[in-house]
């Protein structure tokens, strides 16, 4: 019995005809690189599936801390505040620019009217920043519950995803070397990586945020009430 | 793939992905679905989203180039299924067999 190796395979078969089922010549380097990288991505997904399983097992036990739905609600209100603060800052900055342009020159900073206006703007801006900071602190205080295994599982499953995102941001820096074939293959792997990461995020988002939000079976109307006087762990 | 069909395929994929995302939010934030069915709806939409990503963005088609990739994916899905289902099953069983906690 003879074993066919790459060396002995007929070299006349063009690379484009390489088949995954054994026929044809050796596959092109691009296909082989993508396949090897695909194996790496799958091992990554297996690792994240272990973290998801831990989350699914642990998330129900909050030890008196806030449930997933309450956390989601708080985070949503905070994001609404952020959006309105950014819009307000934008409108204020645009108003200042427009008034300056209409006056044709910088406004006279010595006039008490302009001073009062500037003071008011600074005060409002600081207020907006402090408001955002307070909301964030309140969220952290309410969310942080070391006895809650929901907290541990959430941190354990979302921080590796964040780390792996952060790591891959500076991956395509080799573009600076020019778009050689090797660099193009690296970019292909980068695109595969990000889209596979998207798949992981579909899992994280569905399980941690959307299902955590709707899984304790209460109606939206009951959750909308203020969170005052809730039992703490 | 020539540029034009590639752009068309990416655009179709983007549209389908956005559609599935919006549907997920609508399902989770409204009472459109019967409440106990919401997790099932979300899981179905998540699988649709994953399918869109695999076909349109990761180019996992039925062509001969992706035969090996699909086999590897099938193996990965098996392992993921075993890890998640096994963990949830075993721990739920242990949990239901726990002694009642003293209040």
Image: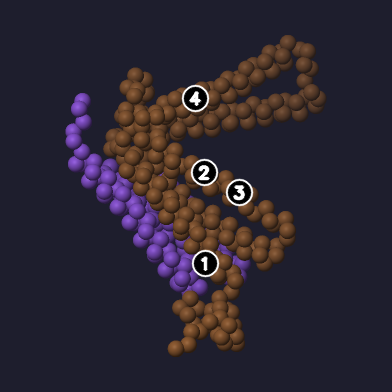
Colour representing chain B = purple
Q: In this picture, is B40 found above or below A92?
A: below
Q: Which residue is mark 4?
A: A137
Real-space CA distance between mark 4 and mark 2, rounded to the nearest whole angstrom: 21 Å
Real-space CA distance between mark 1 and mark 4, rounded to the nearest whole angstrom: 46 Å
Q: At numbered mark 1, what does the secondary structure look like: helix, strand or loop? A: helix
Q: At numbered mark 3, what does the secondary structure look like: helix, strand or loop? A: helix
Real-space CA distance between mark 3 and mark 2, rounded to the nearest whole angstrom: 11 Å
Colour representing chain A = brown
Real-space CA distance between mark 4 and mark 3, rounded to the nearest whole angstrom: 28 Å
Disc 4 to disc 3: CB gap under 8 Å? no
Mark nearest the camera among 1 and 4 is: 1
Mark nearest the camera among 4 and 2 is: 2
Q: Which residue is mark 3?
A: A169
- Earlier-in-chain disc, 1 versus 2: 1
Q: Check chain identity for marks 3 and 2: say if they share one.
A: yes
- Earlier-in-chain disc, 1 versus 4: 1
Is any atom of residue A168 visible in this view? yes
């Amino acid at each position: 019995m003879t074993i066919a190796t790459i060396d002995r395979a007929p070299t006349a078969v063009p690379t484009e005809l390489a088949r995954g089922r054994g026929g044809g010549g050796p596959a092109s380097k691009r296909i082989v690189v993508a396949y090897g990288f695909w194996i790496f991505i799958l091992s990554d997904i297996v690792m994240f599936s272990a973290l998801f399983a831990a989350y699914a097992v642990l998330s129900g036990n909050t030890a008196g801390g806030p449930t997933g739905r309450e956390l989601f609600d708080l985070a949503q209100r905070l994001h609404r505040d952020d959006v309105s603060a950014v819009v307000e800052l934008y409108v204020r900055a645009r108003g200042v620019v427009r008034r300056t342009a209409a006056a044709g020159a910088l406004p006279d900073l010595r006039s008490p009217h302009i001073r009062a206006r500037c003071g008011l703007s600074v005060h409002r801006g600081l207020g907006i920043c402090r408001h955002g900071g307070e909301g964030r602190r309140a969220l952290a205080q309410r969310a942080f519950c070391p006895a809650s295994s929901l907290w541990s599982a959430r941190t354990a499953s979302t921080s590796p995803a964040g780390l792996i995102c952060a790591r891959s941001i500076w991956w395509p820096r080799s573009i600076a070397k020019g778009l050689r074939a090797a660099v193009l293959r690296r970019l292909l792997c980068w695109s595969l990586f990000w889209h596979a990461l998207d798949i992981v995020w579909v899992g994280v988002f569905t399980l941690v945020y959307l299902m955590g939000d709707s899984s304790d079976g209460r109606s939206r109307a009951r959750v909308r009430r203020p969170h005052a006087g809730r039992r703490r762990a | 793939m020539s540029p034009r069909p590639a752009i068309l395929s990416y655009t179709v994929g983007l549209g389908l992905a956005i559609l599935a995302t919006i549907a997920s939010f609508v399902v989770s934030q409204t009472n459109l679905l019967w409440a106990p069915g919401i997790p099932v709806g979300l899981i179905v939409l998540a699988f649709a989203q994953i399918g869109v990503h695999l076909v349109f963005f990761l180019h996992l088609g039925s062509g001969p180039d992706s035969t090996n990739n699909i086999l590897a994916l099938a193996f990965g899905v098996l392992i993921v299924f075993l890890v998640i289902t096994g963990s949830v099953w075993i721990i739920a069983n242990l949990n239901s067999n726990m002694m009642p906690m003293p209040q």
